[in-house]
Image (spheres, rainbow, N blue to C red):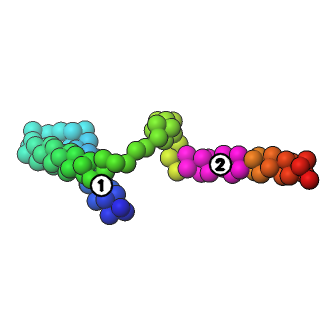
């Protein structure tokens, strides 16, 4: 399973790097850099195709919408997992307290 993600991560890193380089070319565009611009645009199209191919391998993965909300807010999506675990732990402690209370009452 991790291999699927590694493959996607590799393609995304290449894609981001090509976008970064494209930004540099465009920000200081000279007519002589047209060939480089065209080449970079072709790399971006190819990169998007590669990412789309990875989609087929990951079709069974679902990501909670809250994770995307974390990303939109500029927060680390790993915090979502941490906070979910903290909420589960707190709920577990609450339920354990209720069970202990019921045991005492029934004794």
Work out whether residue 97 or residue 77 is closer to the camera in this orientation and state it. 97
Residue 22 x %, y %: 22, 44
* Residue at 20% from the left image edge and 50% from the top image edge: 53
Spatial CA distance of label 2 from label 1 is 30 Å
The earlier-in-sequence mark between 2 and 1 is: 1
Q: Secondary structure at mark 1?
A: helix
Q: Nearer the viewer, mark 2 or mark 1?
A: 2
Q: Where are the magenta residues, as a range?
A: 80-92
Residue 57 x %, y %: 27, 53
Hey, which residue is sitting farthest bottom in the picture?
3
Asked whether the beta carbons under mark 2 and mark 1 sit within 8 Å of each other, the answer is no
* Residue at 60% from the left image edge and 47% from the top image edge: 84
Placement of the N terminus among the 4 image quadrants? bottom left
Residue 102 x %, y %: 85, 47
* Residue at 71% from the left image edge and 50% from the top image edge: 92
- 74 vs 59, left or right, is right
Indicate yes or no whether the magenta region holds residue 84: yes
Q: Secondary structure at mark 2?
A: helix
Indicate yes or no whether the magenta region holds residue 27: no
- 106 vs 82, left or right, is right
Looking at the magenta stretch, what is its main secondary structure?
helix
Work out whether residue 14 or residue 89 is closer to the camera in this orientation and state it. 89
Q: Which mark is residue 54?
A: none
Badge 1 is on which residue? Answer: 8
Pointer 2: residues within 10 angstroms few (<14), some, or many (20+)?
A: few
- 30 vs 27, left or right, is left
- 63 vs 107, left or right, is left
Q: Which mark is residue 88?
A: 2
Determine the image quadrant of residue 37.
Answer: top left
Residue 19 x %, y %: 26, 45
Observer able to see residue 95: yes
Observer able to see residue 97: no
């Amino acid at each position: 399973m991790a291999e699927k993600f590694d493959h996607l991560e590799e393609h995304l890193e290449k894609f981001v790097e090509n976008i970064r380089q494209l930004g540099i070319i465009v920000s200081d565009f000279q007519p002589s850099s047209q060939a480089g611009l065209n080449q970079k645009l072709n790399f971006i199209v190819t990169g998007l195709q590669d990412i789309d191919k990875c989609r087929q391998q990951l079709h069974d993965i679902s990501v909670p919408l809250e994770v995307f909300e974390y990303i939109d807010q500029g927060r680390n999506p790993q915090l979502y997992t941490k906070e979910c675990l903290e909420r589960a732990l707190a709920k577990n402690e609450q339920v354990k307290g209720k069970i202990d209370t019921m045991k005492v009452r029934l004794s």
